[in-house]
Amino acid sequence: MRRAGGGWVPDRRALVGVVHVEPLPGSPRGSLSFAEIEKLACADAAAWKEGGADAVIVENFGDTPFPRAAAPVETVAFLALIARSVIAETALPTGINILRNDALGALAAAAASGASFIRVNVLTHAFVTDQGIIEGVAFDLLRRRAALDADVAVWADVMVKHAAPLAPCDPAQAARDLAFRGGADAIIVTGEATGDAARRDDVRLVARAAAGVPLLVGSGVTPDNAPSFGDDPAGFIVGTWCKVDGRIDPERVGRIASCIHGEAG
């Protein structure tokens, strides 16, 4: 894997495991103490490493409903602490995603914890989502990163899932805007919803439009469909498929890691 000037991005055929954090304190669905939440997150991260993942990303998946933009300050603080513990537990490159689109909070948490990348759902353009209209944050985010001198890569979704563009938007142009106007260090292609597989044609289109910028497939990845994406993806973001009874299973991680790394079908 290569380490860019702006943080960590995959080079070729990387497995990035998602640590779906339980509802944090303050979340309406929360019931666990922070110590319990942190312990479960670290256990999942350790399972990803045991199975052969190349990196992990910490995400406040349990905090539904999500805010449109800035998350509560306590969410940012808790995720920074969890990311720091995950890094200490695994020594893997670690990212942060604060849903729905708190890019500045994710950057702050990454800078504080030592995380090396963040995921941003809407970096450029504007999308209609179940949280309302979300506008791109590239201007503020990249200037804050420069001000902090933070070694943190920005991974950005193109035509993000659970959303529709506010105005007609060509996917190829959206990818070019992300890469060459929005400053994304890596671009993520997903299906229409969590767990839905990305379309091979969409991956190929984005890869051609934003040539030179690493591309990741970000939803619905399984051992059956991973080979179908060919050589275009630099990485695959995987979460749901590797869970057994709600927790990450190292054996399933090993199966998909072997497939992605090309060691077995």
Image (cartoon, rainbow, N blue to C red):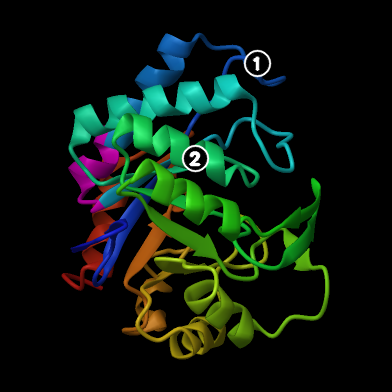
Of 70 and 147, the residue lying toward us: 147
What SS does tag 2 mark?
helix
* Count of numbered circles on the image: 2
Mark 1 lies on residue: 26
Q: Is 50 one of the magenta-colored residues?
A: yes
Q: Is residue 102 visible?
A: yes
Residue in the image at 62% along x and 55% along y: 137
Q: Is residue 219 visible?
A: no
* Residue 49: image location, x then y, percent: 22, 42
What is the C-alpha distance between the residues marked 1 and 2? Answer: 18 Å
What SS does tag 1 mark?
loop
In the picture, the quarter occupied by the C terminus is bottom left
Q: Main secondary structure of the magenta part?
A: helix
Answer with left or right where residue 130 lies relative to residue 20. Answer: right
In the rendered structure, which amino acid carries the disc numbered 1? Answer: Gly
In the rendered structure, which amino acid carries the disc numbered 2? Answer: Ala
Of 6 and 201, the residue lying toward us: 6
Of 104 and 165, the residue lying toward us: 104
Q: Is 116 one of the magenta-colored residues?
A: no
Answer with left or right where residue 184 lies relative to residue 171. Answer: left
* Residue 126: image location, x then y, percent: 75, 64
Residue in the image at 62% along x and 85% along y: 173
User: On screen, 12 above or below 48?
Assistant: below
Mark 2 lies on residue: 106
Q: Which residues are magenta?
A: 46-54
